[in-house]
Image (spheres, helix red, strand yellow):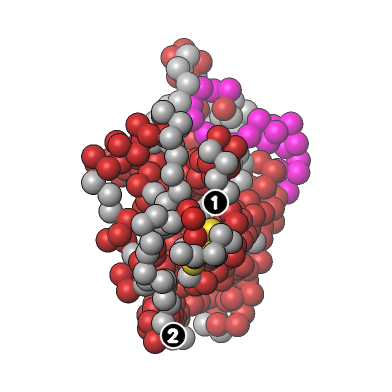
Amino acid sequence: MTIRPTSFAFAALAGLALLGACGSGDAPAAPVDAETAALPLSNGMTAAETIDARQTHLKAVGKAFKTISDGLKESEPDMAALQAAAASVPAETAGMADWFPEGSGPASGVKTDALPVIWEARADFDSKMADFKAAAATLDTAAQGGDIAAITEAFKATGATCKACHQTYRADD
Amino acid sequence: MPAPNARVLVWDWTVRLFHWLLVLGVGAMWWTAEQGVMDWHRRIGLALLGLIVYRLVWGLIGPGTARFTRMLARPGAIMAYVRDLAARRHRPHFGHNPLGSLSVFAMLLALVTQVSTGLFAVDVDGLESGPLASKVSFETGRLLAEIHETSFKVLLALIALHVVAIAAYLFLFKDNLVRPMITGHRPQTDVAPPQPPLRAPWPRILAAAAIAAATVYAVLAIGG
């Protein structure tokens, strides 16, 4: 029993090496029923395409938020970069209402953190997406105005709408 | 000839303080992460950074039982120690025993991984990030956050192993290793051959503390 520290250390190193190798890819987790997965959903795309597209958009939003968050930590932020990031969020999320059609949950067999409860509480989910879009628009306006205090406040408000939705509708949060 | 109840110092007070602050700190980091109280997660994380830097410097300039060079046991010595344990032969050690040293190195490595990845980690939404995250890309920050999460599991496993080992020494070998980590002392009769007295001189304590504080200050200054 007591000799195990070494094996744990090796496990740790092996784990780190693996992480480094595979990154945060979104490969299909469960075996996908090829026929079901290939069927177009109400947005005209397959479940795999839908999930891939929304993850790409949301990652771009995460990246933009990091740019804004980094900027707000600086005493003299790069305002042009901050404004571009804030403007990219409404652009990236313009089609958000169509990102979660019926059939694009985990039951599709494609790996996704979207929880099935989205389609059980659709009205609430839609209203939370609307909250986010309104907050993101306010953030964009504040950023273009260039007032740091206003941007900070709008950024916090936008982040709160992300969390409000993710808390209920996204796994692992 | 020492008195029968004579005691000898095996852990200096800074090592003991480090140990118990670490217990509190790691617990607090776990709780704040689970609850999403990220402003406190960052503050306590910075305090842990200072604590760990102190311990690393103390491993170089501290007294005998804190020194890393004294903790490096040859594989042969480790194997001999394991054979003794397996045969239920246990003799108290002055400081870390060969297996305990391995455990300490593994835990320190995991802790160093935790604090250094945490400095740059970014959450998936780009909303929360470590104090130095602005120096890396979103993708790098995400990768470091994934490592941060995985290495915490490794750290937890190492801590569990450590606690089980301490319990095993207590119940199987009737050797209480918790008391010396609190009082610093063991009975003189546990220590053979006699060791030179352990000293933790103030100039060295202050030097190690200054390096730790400077590291935290540097992170704050760079991170803004």
Query: Count of labels shown?
Result: 2
Q: In this view, does A145 lie above or below A15?
A: below
Secondary-structure class at tag 2: helix
| Magenta residues, start to end | A107-127
For badge 1, the amino acid type reads Leu
Q: Residues under labels 1 and 2: Cα distance?
A: 26 Å
Locate residue B15, reporting x and y percent.
48, 67
Query: Going by the image, does B203 lie left or right of B35?
Result: left
Q: Where is A26 relative to B67, above or below? A: above
Mark 1 lies on residue: B177
Of mark 1 and mark 2, the one earlier in the sequence is 1
Q: Which chain carries label 1?
A: B
Residue identifier under label 2: B202
Residue A19 found in image quarter: top left
Q: Which residue is located at x 60 percent, y 68 percent?
A: B39
> Residue A59's x, y, as percent?
45, 50
